[in-house]
Amino acid sequence: MRALRRDPSSSDSFPQDVLELQGYLTGPTRIPGVEAIPGKGTDVPLYILGSSLFGAKLAAALGLPYAFASHFAPNALHDAVAVYRREFEPSAQLEKPHVMVGVNVVAAATDGEAQDMFRATLRERVVLMLGRGRTFTDDEADLILESPQGQQIAQMMKYSAVGTPDAVVDYLTRFTAHSGADELIVAHQSPGVAGQLRSVELLAEAAGLVGATPARTL
């Protein structure tokens, strides 16, 4: 239970927790007498996923790959990437900076279908964040999205590739250059699993990834 960090203040020791985990996987352990079985000697690579400058600085200091959650926290993207690249210190795991950046994707056969799915996703976010146990009609959710609070929810999905497969690939190409990413975290958005899976398939086909090594997909 202590290792699971049940204490709310445990975030203060996060940097030490990362080093502790690294020790369990690579050895020697940083906690005398505590070994990870299975796990010890596997050298599983660690990544720092963050949505603020704190994670960027930590990943840089430890020489780890850094993933920024711009698919729901877009505002600090450029500052976080710049800080990480500027302060990066090489490590046994990584010789040079490696940045992963999150981006939402809604790919569908037609642009209209993709826009409808994206709108439905925004409505779901309204219920999730403001519903407090109640649901909203589509009209109610749309009215909320036009309010200041709703605009903040929409802003969280600022970086979103929405449209036909070719349009999505074009957006992702431009977004990669815009963000300075070495790799993308693709978060497929749709109210249902079937829509998410179809979005994955369409993007893979359009990007020429069918038959390639499977990508990590959220």
Image (cartoon, rainbow, N blue to C red):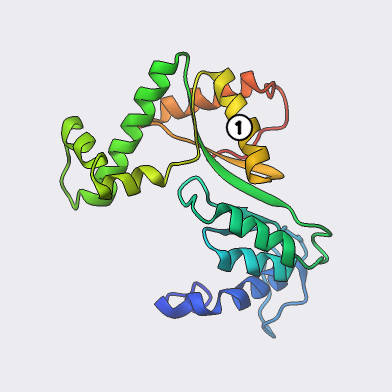
Residue closest to the far top: 110
Residue 29 place in picture, x, y as percent: 72, 77
Residue 47 place in picture, x, y as percent: 66, 58
- SS for dot 1: helix
Q: Is residue 84 left or right of residue 141?
A: right
Q: Residue at x 23, y 50 (%)?
A: 130
Q: Amino acid at mark 1?
A: Leu
Residue 216 place in picture, x, y as percent: 62, 40
50, above or below 176, in the image? below
Residue 13 place in picture, x, y as percent: 55, 79
- Comparing 52 with 196, the one in front is 52
- Can residue 134 be seen here? yes
Crowding near the residue tagged with mark 1, few <14, some 14–19, many ≥20 C-alpha atoms within 10 Å: many
Q: Residue at x 42, y 25 (%)?
A: 194
- Comparing 39 with 73, the one in front is 73
Q: Residue at x 69, y 63 (%)?
A: 39
Q: Is residue 75 left or right of residue 173?
A: left
Q: How many marks?
A: 1
80, above or below 122, in the image? below
What residue is shown with label 1? 172
- Comparing 86 with 68, the one in front is 86
Q: Residue at x 61, y 25 (%)?
A: 169
- Can residue 46 be seen here? no
